[in-house]
Image: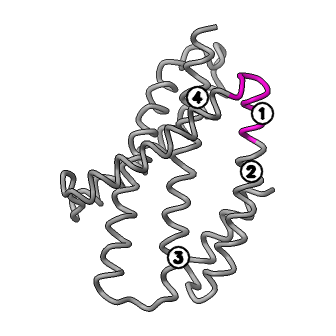
């Protein structure tokens, strides 16, 4: 139930930014419970090293993307935003289609394993690049002297993306770990 409450908190934050302080805390608590639960399951079945690697990887991606944005090596413009949104929609649709096909397929999930791995790899890349969109959004709000009530909303957006990167990296590491065994 924690992820559902977290999603509701994110939606509430974007609809009512004046309450972002409260909804951001609700999101953080719920998402913390969820991530702790998922991380504990992964640590139990695959070892704590995967969780540590995902954490280090997440902070590495965050630092790398911040460096790329701050130095201007990657610039976020309207084309980049549209491209990233298209990639996100494509990931959602392909994931849903893969799920539906694997549920109704007689061969089960085995026939779609390579496609699943590909989707996870693309999802890691897209989630990482979405950090650049968050940095750019924060930068624009700061430069435009937006009201302070948006600080919590922007921070929540960044936190959501960081959690997404962590989950995708953890999922990729689990896949790679299963591949070795």
Q: Whole-Å distance between the Cαs marked 4 and 3?
A: 37 Å
- Above or below residue 48? Residue 178 is above
> Looking at the image, is mark 2 or mark 1 earlier in the sequence?
2
Callout 4 secondary element: helix
Q: Where is residue 135 drawn, in percent x and y?
A: 36, 64
In this rendered view, identify the residue nearer to me: 31 or 99: 31
> Looking at the image, is mark 2 or mark 3 earlier in the sequence?
2
Callout 3 secondary element: helix
Q: Residues within 10 Å of mark 3 (few under 14, many from 20)?
A: many
Q: Quadrant of the N terminus?
A: bottom right
Q: Which quarter of the picture shows residue 147?
A: bottom left
Task: Look at discs 4 and 3 and give the one toward the viewer.
Answer: 3
- Above or below residue 144? Residue 1 is above
Q: Where is residue 35 drawn, in percent x and y?
A: 70, 47
Q: Where is residue 141 drawn, in percent x and y?
A: 35, 80
Q: Which residue is mark 3?
A: 153
């Amino acid at each position: 139930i924690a992820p559902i409450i977290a999603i509701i908190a994110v939606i509430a934050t974007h609809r009512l930014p004046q309450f972002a302080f409260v909804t951001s805390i609700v999101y953080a608590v719920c998402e913390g419970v969820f991530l702790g639960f998922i991380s504990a399951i992964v640590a139990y079945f695959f070892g704590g090293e995967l969780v540590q690697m995902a954490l280090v990887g997440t902070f590495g991606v965050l630092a790398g993307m911040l460096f790329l944005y701050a130095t201007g090596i990657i610039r976020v413009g309207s084309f980049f935003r549209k491209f990233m949104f298209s990639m996100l929609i494509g990931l959602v649709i392909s994931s849903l289609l893969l799920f539906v096909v694997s549920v109704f397929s007689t061969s089960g999930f085995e026939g779609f394993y390579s496609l699943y791995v590909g989707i996870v790899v693309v999802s890691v890349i897209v989630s990482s690049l979405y950090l650049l969109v968050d940095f750019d959004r924060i930068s624009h709000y700061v430069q435009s002297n937006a009201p302070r009530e948006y600080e919590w909303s922007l921070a929540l957006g960044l936190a959501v993306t960081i959690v997404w990167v962590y989950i995708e990296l953890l999922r990729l590491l689990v896949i790679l770990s299963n591949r070795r065994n």
